[in-house]
Image (tube, rainbow, N blue to C red):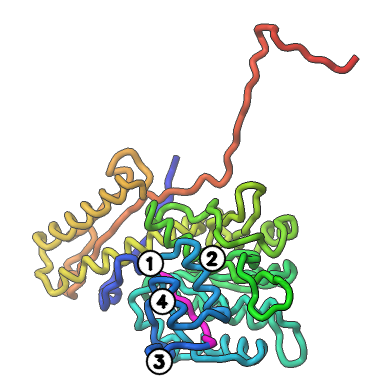
Amino acid sequence: MAMVNPGVSISETSLTSVLADDAVTMPLFMSYTVTQASSVTTLVPVNVTSLTQAVSLFGGRGTLAYSLRHFFENRGQSCYVLPLGTGEEENTTRLTRLITALQSAELQESVAADRHTGLLLVPEMSELNDLVADDSIDPATLWYQGWQALLQLCLQGQQRFALLEQPEDPVQAIALSKQSFSADLCQNGAAWWPRLQTSYVQDGSDVKTYLFLSPLPAVAAVIQSSATDNGVWKPPANIALAKTLRPSRNILQSRDLLNQDGVYCNPIRSFAGKGVRLWGCRTLLNDESSPWRYIQTRLLANSVEAYLSDLARVFLFEPNNAQTWMKLQGQIWTWLRQQWLDGAFFGTTEEEAFTVNIGLNDTMSAEDISAGKMIIQLRLALLAPAEFIDINLTLDLRDGSATTNNGS
């Protein structure tokens, strides 16, 4: 089986800061808040490590509060929240402000300065499903602008990945999926459909009404917990969701959405006796020939880039000679070998799984060295998931013990 090796480039510009070990799968929630503690500052990320802490910082009501609750109750371990300010205006005004905030230079600077997170999500955008288009607002435009803003944030030079939600209505979802998004943007994001009916009861309702929430907090929790338990290369799919009653739409209503030429969407399905499960692990890139079509491939490459960026900082300003190259190559090789032994790469031998090259006339010219450049080249044999499993059953009736009865 021939394996395709995506290209990963590490340049000196990526070594200006250090990423945390789990930054690639650390979620960053961006949202307005109903209430927030005095210790919380607008547009300054705050680390939240438990549901109790989330309630103490942001209260127990509102979209953000319920989103954090769903995150932690789906085995999310830790996250960051970027508060955009308090806001209780009616949906139209607040959601328009939300999209404007995502496009603002202030938010972009705040996200660029943060070195602790890798997954970007805005669960509050799910409320666009409840808006009705009129002369003053077009939900379809806001969906597109929100997606575009989040995907653009992923191109700021560090390892970020956007978690996106498709509109609940299949017609709107198909229209959004056929919008123009470049391949560079699509490989850095993934979308899920539809909203989820949770087991949380809406406050202040005269009748027992279960809340519908964005699927993204649960998706973020699944990605984080799966990476911790199994490695970031494990596809975050076929995993049951907690505190979830059902998807808001049936899978039969999504066939046109899942079989079209636009960006790819991962469905969320309900199975009798097995719960509600994430049923896909594709990025937005709807290209069967691209290695970046899988979420775990993109996140694994991000993880490798993050680790090597951190490791290479130790060698900044060291002599650019063979001794330094050998030290760096050895440390990279040792780490990649451990990842391969843990199951990250394809191949039965190290040579099949990965290669690390660095040196004069190999990865660098004399001019590169004179310019202060140290260039490392990696080749990684990345794995693809088993998306389709065929089972062939053969019945051998040669012993004559079985007969055919046509009912005559």
Q: CA distance from mark 3 to mark 2?
A: 34 Å
The x, y position of residue 147, in whole percent, is: 57, 76
Along the line of sight, which residue is nearer the eye, 258 or 4? 258
Q: How many other residues sit within 10 Å of disc 4, few (<14), some (14-19) or many (≥20)? A: few
* Marks 2 and 4 close (CB-CB < 8 Å): no
What residue is drawn where x is 50% and y is 82%? 59
Q: Which residue is mark 1?
A: 24
Nearest to N terminus: mark 1 or mark 2: 1
Q: CA distance from mark 1 to mark 2?
A: 15 Å
Helix, strand or loop for disc 3? loop
Q: Which residue is mark 2?
A: 190
Q: CA distance from mark 4 to mark 1?
A: 22 Å
What residue is drawn where x is 79% and y is 14%? 404
Helix, strand or loop for disc 2? strand
Left or right: 269 as drawn, with respect to 184: right
The x, y position of residue 356, in whole percent, is: 25, 54
Disc sitting over residue 53 in the figure: 4
